[in-house]
Amino acid sequence: MENKVIFYEGMDVDPSDHNTLQQFAQEGLDHVVADVVTANQRFAGLTISKTSATAVQIAPGRLYSGGKRYAFATAMSQDFLTSLPLAGKKIVSVVAWGSEPDTGVTPREFLLNEETGASEPRAVAMRKSRICNIQFAQSQDAPDPTPPIIDAGYTRVANITLSTTGVEKIVMIVENQVENLDAIGDRTDALEVFEAEAGPKISTLSTDLANLANKLKASADQALLGRMLQRLAVLEFKDQIPASAVDSFADYFLSPDFTDTANPLSHTKIEEGLRFPDYNANVSQLQIFDPLNPKVMIKGGLMFPAYDRELWLGNTNYGGEAQIAGYSYQTFQMVQKTMSRQRVRYGNEFTVCTNSTFWNTGTYDYFAQTFQRNGETFEAVTDGFWGDAAQNINFDAAGNAFNHQNMRLRQIFVDTVQEPYWDKVTIDHTVSGAQIAESFMQGQDIWLDAIGLFFTRLADAGSVTVSICEVSKFGLPNLQSVVSHTTLERSSMVAYPAETVVPIQPVFLAAGKRYAILVTTAANHWVAMTPGEDFTSGTFFYVLDGAYAQGDGTRDLMFKLYRAKFRQNRVVVEFNSLSLAGGILSVDINADVIQPGSTQLTYEIQPANTGVWYNLIDVDNYVLGKGGSVPVTCGFRAVLAGSVDMMPVVALSGSQVKISRPDTTRTAIAKVRTLPAASTSIHVIERYEGWDGTKHAANCQLRTGAGYNTVTDAAAKVDVAGTDELGQAFIERTYVFNLGSAVTTYQVQHTATTATPNVCFHVAWRKDWSL
């Protein structure tokens, strides 16, 4: 109540004081209704039901209008027998409006003279009521009638459709009903539960949409291209080779398999073509210039943009406990995948080679030739579709190569493995104990930073191994595809209801994939469980007789997942500068990288004394050797861009940064070719791409005889010049060798020079045949 009437001892009371009391109370309640419930025209109750073929009944209810409440106290019946349409249909709108009449007229004595006590009776209204009035507005008869138009001061309660036989349909106008606070509270509770579960996922939708858009662009026409390349590869090997040839061969220089790199005369490099070797080179590891840089965090050798830990997913409604040791004890062999890689090559020597399309044929080991570092061994992994361990690039059912993406532009090569973790390089783990697991569906890309577990009972000693693995296509935890592996010591474990937070080496979980939490221990620890109906996106597993049971749908592991919430959506990190005696003309970065589709990782260099940073993928602003200037020292930095939900990450540990300058001479000796029949006529064709006749020279010779020390020059040379689809000049030079005596074995020797290391060319392929 906003106002009150004040009464005093011994004070006479005027009738208006009592009326004012009621007026103040009514005004206060009107304000509450208008401010809290509704100031619009709404109704409550007034439910209309059909009582006969032509009659309806309107139940009691209330009308709210302008903050005032009007009552409809007594049920009302209405018969439409005389209002039925003669043909077609009509709609009768039940409308409500409020009035405030004086009611309750009652005889009362009114004092006329206080001294004599004279009075007279009068009939007066004793109540002022707020009444909800009901009226009926009818439309015109029509085959498909519309509701009648009503004035703004009326509230439409329902539309009743009448046919020639009676009441056909009653439709309450739900949007005009006043909201019940209990119903609103129930819906709010449901929304809060939904927001707690879905809110973090919804907040990352912009990141996921960007990721999806990038993936769609990257996948265009790959299936068609893959099929065409596999078929054209066979035809290309036979191109321009006569049917009368004794034998033929082609080398696309995608691997050193057919080049005698151990030959003392060999002085070359094979990287998507036969290229000039390094004259000078320096190899180092990525290293942050300022180890105290607050913009980044180094964890396990990985460089993360600075982030805070945030709860991502929680399944915490206690519903019992489970004894881990109650399940089968055994020794588990786990294989942990490692971060996949990205390689960025930048320099004038990286002329685009047309042979790079032949990676898709599966003949060459793209991953080993592109990403291998320091002589490490890559695993030969059986592809899930083809079942062929020799298949080095994975293919889908359509024959389309996937899992990697490469970009080839003048002066810049970028190769990225799109699967965040690969099994080319793995880590083996052996863990003994009982094991339980809980699977879950990952809705959005996240960096998982910690896992929360709840132990209801703890043994006096005994550690716990906590792992994250991918789930197989059969829905079971896949121990051969572990992505995170951590040992939790007993001293770090606490009893329920406290939470044991397990920090892990942050691991990337990809949207749309299923993962599982593995808990393995030899100790008698117990874990908290939740009812099975609470967590519908996962399954609880345990091991019996050496294998996972099919899953327990009645309960789930109680757990929490914590993600990295990044503080900035763009971070620039400066590394130690690059330096090479005589100058730098090439930069080759090979590092473990996870770069989700919604993010970007690029590198920039700043040649000494320029004061300008150049992004390596900005091919329109190429800088190394520009204008003849070859920088000896360059600043070096990385630019990481994404969102606060997702950022790229690069591994400093194990990374390799090679800076170099190519030589101006090249010699390559092919491995010995053995013919099925002796020949005196041998033809060799080499394709030179990035060719500049004013600066480049190339020759081809045959080596035969004892020790292959007899060198023979070509009797004839024929050039066919052209320009490829990238605008690079090329020539295809045919060498014809007429030998004095027939040979069954020979080697092809290639030599080349360039007038400057700043302008290079490569050999895309070599084909030879004998007649």
Image (tube, rainbow, N blue to C red):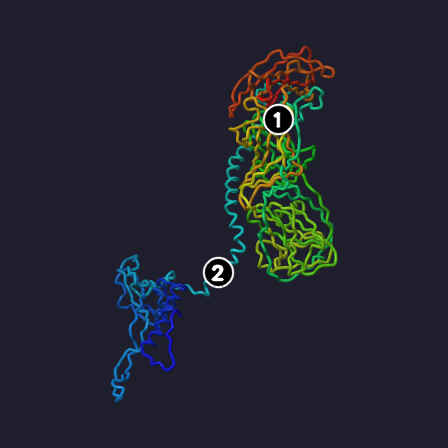
In the image, is 194 to the left or to the right of 23?
Answer: right
Residue 666: quarter of image: top right
What amino acid is labelled 1 in the image? Val
Helix, strand, or loop for circle 1? Answer: loop
Can residue 434 be seen by looking at this rendering? yes
Name the foreground residue: 618 vs 15: 15
Can residue 250 be seen by looking at this rendering? no
Up the image or down, 11 lies above or below 726; here it is below
What amino acid is labelled 2 in the image? Thr
Indicate the quadrant containing the C terminus: top left, top right, bottom left or bottom right: top right
Up the image or down, 199 lies above or below 691; here it is below
Indicate the quadrant containing the N terminus: top left, top right, bottom left or bottom right: bottom left
Q: Which residue is mark 1?
A: 632
Mark 2 burial class by Cα count in 10 Å: few <14, some 14-19, many 20+ = few
Name the foreground residue: 304 vs 261: 304
Please give the label number shown on residue 203: none
In the image, is 704 to the left or to the right of 144?
Answer: right
Q: Which residue is mark 2?
A: 188
Pinpoint residue 25: horizontal percent, then vertical percent.
Answer: 37, 72
Q: CA distance from mark 2 to mark 1?
A: 66 Å
Q: Earlier in the sequence, mark 2 or mark 1?
A: 2
Mark 1 burial class by Cα count in 10 Å: few <14, some 14-19, many 20+ = some
Pinpoint residue 538: horizontal percent, then vertical percent.
Answer: 60, 53
